[in-house]
Image (spheres, rainbow, N blue to C red):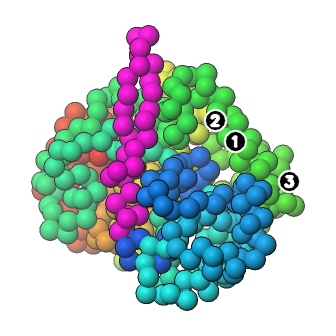
């Protein structure tokens, strides 16, 4: 992991320096060794350009938000790629839809050569569609997000959480070898602040509040407004505030529509925009091998805890801990940490939640390269084992290797031979 971001923090009238490494840099290198083109997608200001900037100096970069670069590429995309047939980065590729057909032609002209193009894009469902429809089989995609806990507090002590999940021979007891990445204060600081890089670069509560406010304003007026010019921006801004209260809950579009004063199809479109622009994560229900009546509505959450807390006007830890939504915020933050670690290691996993009509619930269910893994998420230090009946039953009925409980304990603990509790600090 060679790409680093230097972070200055003010501490006792001096400065300390930390080095943050993007965990997906090895995956980017691997994809470039195998595919002609790699797409780095994700929300605005999450570090896509910085990650692309970690490529060797002989790569040329064109930013389509810069008028001169956009004119150069847009004038004749086919000619552009003939003149620049390799080692080219194109930022904000969604701004030029004609680019993708020309890129496909350029790739096919020398299909056997890998590592020729990198494109980045933010806040655009259309980018994902262009990639899947036009460049299928020619491109690999990395979904970048804001800094994860494991990036802010890296550890080199043995295999990490995601590596153990990916090890299909691992038992519950193997997770006892995990070591902490930080202490309980650092965990809560990360939870409160979220992972967007800019507030980590310039620490301070006032700057973080101003930056988050401007981020929301830019997201609505610039990104979403440009992608969906007919959208009622005032109504969508109200929807974002509504989302903060819905984060971590099961979603009923009809109820949301009534609350906003819009039609159910419009509410559904708003959710699709939020999900497609990487602001919101939709978790579908896990309904396979069902032996009970299950809740069929999807669940969802805002993907950055710092942004959620800003929308809820929670400026400090005391306000957060006393808020009725603190538990749901914690659950969302932990879920995102797990999913980011899996994504950045190239592990293909679906993410779901599970709830029966009787109320038995599992917060996160993973299925894919890690097998089938149910995960309960608890803010508490200690766990009442009697409240893990749903997790034990899920493991037994579906033959899972183990179930996990993420907690705020000080060390991992086996709760029985197939259930292990892991502190968030150890992820």
Residue pointed to by mark 1: 216
Task: Mark yes or no: residue 206 visible.
Answer: yes
Name the residue at 59% across, 59% down.
61
Q: CA distance from mark 3 to mark 1?
A: 15 Å
Residue 328, position as x, y percentages in the image: 49, 42
Name the residue at 78% across, 64% down.
71
Q: Secondary structure at mark 3?
A: loop
Quarter holding residue 16: top left
Residue 248, position as x, y percentages in the image: 53, 48
Quarter holding residue 80: bottom right
Q: CA distance from mark 1 to mark 2?
A: 6 Å
User: Does residue 265 show up magenta in the picture?
Assistant: no
Q: How dense is the environment of label 3, judged by Cα within 10 Å: few (below 14), some, or many (20 and up)? A: few
Mark found first going from the N terminus, 3 or 2: 2
Q: How dense is the environment of label 2, judged by Cα within 10 Å: few (below 14), some, or many (20 and up)? A: many
**C-beta proximity under 8 Å, tags 1 and 2:** yes
Q: CA distance from mark 3 to mark 2?
A: 21 Å
Q: How dense is the environment of label 1, judged by Cα within 10 Å: few (below 14), some, or many (20 and up)? A: some
User: Does residue 23 show up magenta in the picture?
Assistant: yes
Q: Nearer the viewer, mark 3 or mark 1?
A: 1
Residue pointed to by mark 3: 232
Instruction: Report the number of discs.
Output: 3
Residue pointed to by mark 2: 212
Q: Which segment is the magenta one?
A: 1-30
Task: Mark yes or no: residue 262 visible.
Answer: no
Residue 44, position as x, y percentages in the image: 62, 50
**C-beta proximity under 8 Å, tags 3 and 2:** no
């Amino acid at each position: 992991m060679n790409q680093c971001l230097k972070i200055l923090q003010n501490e006792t009238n001096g400065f300390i320096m930390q080095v943050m490494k993007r965990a997906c840099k090895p995956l980017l290198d691997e994809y470039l060794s195998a595919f002609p083109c790699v797409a780095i997608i994700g929300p605005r200001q999450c570090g896509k350009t910085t990650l692309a900037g970690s490529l060797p100096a002989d790569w040329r970069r064109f930013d389509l938000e810069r008028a001169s670069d956009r004119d150069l590429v847009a004038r004749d995309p086919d000619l552009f790629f003939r003149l620049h047939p390799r080692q080219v980065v194109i930022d904000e590729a969604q701004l030029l839809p004609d680019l993708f057909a020309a890129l496909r032609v350029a790739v096919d002209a020398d299909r056997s050569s890998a590592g020729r193009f990198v494109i980045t894009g933010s806040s655009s469902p259309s980018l994902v569609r262009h990639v899947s429809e036009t460049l299928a089989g020619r491109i690999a995609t990395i979904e970048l997000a804001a800094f994860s806990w494991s990036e802010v507090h890296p550890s080199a002590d043995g295999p990490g959480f995601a590596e153990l999940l990916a090890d299909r021979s691992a038992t519950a007891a193997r997770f006892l070898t995990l070591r902490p990445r930080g202490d309980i204060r650092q965990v809560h600081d990360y939870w409160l602040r979220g992972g967007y890089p800019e507030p980590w670069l310039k620490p301070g509560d006032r700057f973080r509040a101003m930056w988050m406010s401007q981020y929301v304003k830019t997201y609505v007026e610039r990104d979403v407004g440009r992608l969906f010019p007919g959208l009622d921006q005032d109504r969508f801004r109200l929807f974002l505030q509504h989302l903060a209260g819905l984060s971590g809950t099961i979603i009923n579009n009809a109820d949301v529509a009534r609350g906003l004063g819009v039609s159910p199809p419009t509410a559904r479109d708003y959710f699709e925009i939020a999900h497609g622009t990487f602001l919101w994560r939709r978790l579908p229900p896990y309904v396979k091998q069902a032996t009970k009546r299950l809740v069929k509505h999807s669940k969802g959450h805002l993907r950055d805890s710092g942004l959620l807390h800003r929308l809820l006007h929670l400026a400090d830890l005391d306000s957060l801990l006393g808020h009725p939504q603190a538990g749901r915020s914690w659950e969302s933050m932990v879920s995102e940490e797990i999913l980011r670690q899996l994504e950045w290691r190239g592990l293909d996993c679906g993410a779901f939640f599970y709830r029966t009509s009787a109320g038995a619930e599992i917060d996160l269910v993973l299925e894919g390269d890690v097998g089938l893994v149910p995960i309960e998420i608890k803010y508490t230090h200690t766990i009442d084992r009697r409240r893990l009946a749903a997790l034990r039953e899920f493991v037994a009925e579906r033959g899972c290797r183990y179930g996990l409980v993420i907690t705020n304990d000080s060390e991992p603990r086996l709760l029985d031979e197939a259930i292990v509790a892991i502190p968030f600090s150890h992820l």
